[in-house]
């Protein structure tokens, strides 16, 4: 089935349940944020700025953006690029693109202007959706980009060379007439930067995305009750495919903007996260802060945290031995993948192979 069917299923089964939370330590706790008619702020023990949406709202936002794209002539097979930092808008925009039958093109937020222009040109992108962090980079190439592309800005104070996503989608219908899709329809173009020049485009079908979701759920056993803490960027197959294991079962995810030990442990505690994917430096920083007495585990609610997994780079066995000494009840898994092979599900150690820490693992599910 196409991956969009899972969103429809989650809306039907779990519509009023919270599905996504955004936590941003860079914004003050007292700042309130509304997403048009929806007041998304909820009481929370977190000291940080927080927004959340339910599956109903997720699907509605995806539908509104799908209708906007359709009204501008975007059709099946067209490409729509996303250049956003992790935020609540990211995934509804992604699924709004897929609902139209168009192909989503996530872009690395580290790209400079020339790389952005190269990637949207290589993919023959018709629409670029971007956030406030990228105004300067887009402005430098706006004349060339806007010549034959639509530019949609997500945020307040829309620049003159773009159109406001917030204003436009507010006036779009919250339901969408389904476009027929199959497993073999193209869904997304990811870019693999590599080390030999400009990024290389990788095309995936809906079948690939569905397999990624099943692989992740098979590896880590997500249930509806699990809460996944997502820190890495959503443009990357790693973060996206790990999230899709939770997406498959209707579980909640927390998008965290921040990588300091205190921010991570506070998010795990406040949001009752059960699954956390860390990169090696973040895990090392947490252990270092605990060793130095800068943080105390007793200050946080961490009993529910059941799985820590790492990937994307070599993992020192000594790091995992230290981690297990501090968190003896954690399951652990090392994940390895390629953007060409549905992200992190290519090879994994497996939670049952903790005695083999240091090995890269075994072939992933399927």
Image (spheres, grey):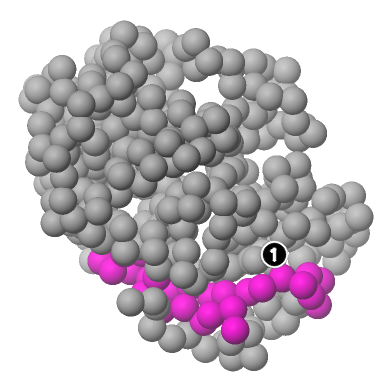
Q: Identify the image quadrant of the C terminus.
A: bottom left
Is 57 situated above or below 221?
above
Q: Is residue 121 left or right of residue 319?
A: left
Which quadrant of the view contains residue 289? bottom right
For image coordinates 73% across by 18% down, the residue present is: 30
Residue identifier under label 1:
306
Q: Residue 97: image x %, image y %?
A: 25, 35
* Residue farthest toward the front in the current orientation of the protein: 13
Binning the other alpha carbons within 10 Å of mark 1 as few (below 14), some (14 to 19) or many (20 upward) gives some
Secondary structure, mark 1, is loop
- In percent of the image, x 57 and y 51: which residue is there? 224
The location of residue 71, given as percent across then percent down, is: 15, 17
Closer to the camera in the image, 277 or 248: 248
Magenta region: 325-352
Where is residue 347? Give x, y as percent: 41, 79
212 on left or right of 305: left
Quarter of the image where one finds residue 51 = top right
Q: Residue at x 43, y 86 (%)?
A: 362
Q: Find residue 40 and report its image quarter.
A: top right
Residue 133 shows in the view: no
In the rendered image, residue 348 lying in the magenta stretch gets the answer yes
324 above or below 55? below
The answer to if 278 sits in the magenta stretch is no
């Amino acid at each position: 089935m196409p991956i969009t069917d899972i969103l429809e299923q989650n809306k039907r089964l779990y519509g009023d349940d919270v599905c996504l939370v955004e936590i941003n330590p860079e914004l003050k706790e007292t700042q309130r944020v509304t997403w048009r008619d929806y007041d998304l702020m909820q009481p929370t023990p977190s000291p940080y700025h927080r927004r959340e949406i339910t599956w109903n709202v997720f699907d509605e936002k995806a539908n509104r953006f799908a209708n906007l794209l359709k009204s501008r002539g975007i059709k099946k097979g067209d490409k729509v690029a996303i250049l956003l930092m992790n935020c609540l808008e990211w995934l509804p925009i992604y699924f709004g693109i897929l609902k139209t039958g168009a192909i989503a093109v996530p872009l690395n937020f580290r790209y400079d202007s020339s790389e952005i222009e190269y990637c949207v040109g290589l993919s023959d992108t018709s629409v670029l959706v971007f956030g406030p962090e990228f105004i300067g980079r887009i402005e430098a190439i706006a004349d060339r980009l806007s010549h034959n592309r639509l530019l949609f800005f997500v945020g307040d104070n829309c620049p003159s060379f773009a159109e406001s996503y917030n204003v436009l989608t507010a006036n779009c219908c919250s339901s969408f007439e389904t476009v027929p899709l199959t497993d073999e329809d193209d869904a997304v173009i990811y870019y693999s930067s590599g080390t030999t020049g400009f990024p290389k485009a990788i095309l995936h079908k809906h079948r690939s995305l569905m397999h990624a979701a099943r692989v992740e759920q098979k590896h880590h056993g997500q249930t509806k009750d699990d809460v996944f803490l997502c820190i890495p960027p959503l443009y990357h197959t790693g973060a996206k495919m790990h999230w899709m294991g939770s997406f498959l079962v209707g579980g909640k995810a927390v998008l965290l903007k921040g990588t300091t030990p205190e921010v991570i442990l506070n998010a795990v505690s406040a949001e009752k996260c059960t699954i956390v994917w860390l990169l090696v430096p973040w895990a090392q920083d947490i252990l270092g802060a605990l060793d130095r007495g800068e943080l105390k585990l007793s200050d946080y609610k961490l009993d529910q945290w059941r799985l820590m997994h790492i990937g994307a780079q070599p993992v020192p066995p000594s790091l995992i031995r230290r981690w297990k000494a501090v968190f003896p009840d954690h399951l652990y898994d090392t994940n390895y993948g390629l953007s060409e092979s549905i992200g992190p599900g290519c090879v994994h150690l497996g939670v049952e192979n903790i005695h083999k820490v240091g090995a890269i693992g075994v072939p992933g599910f399927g």
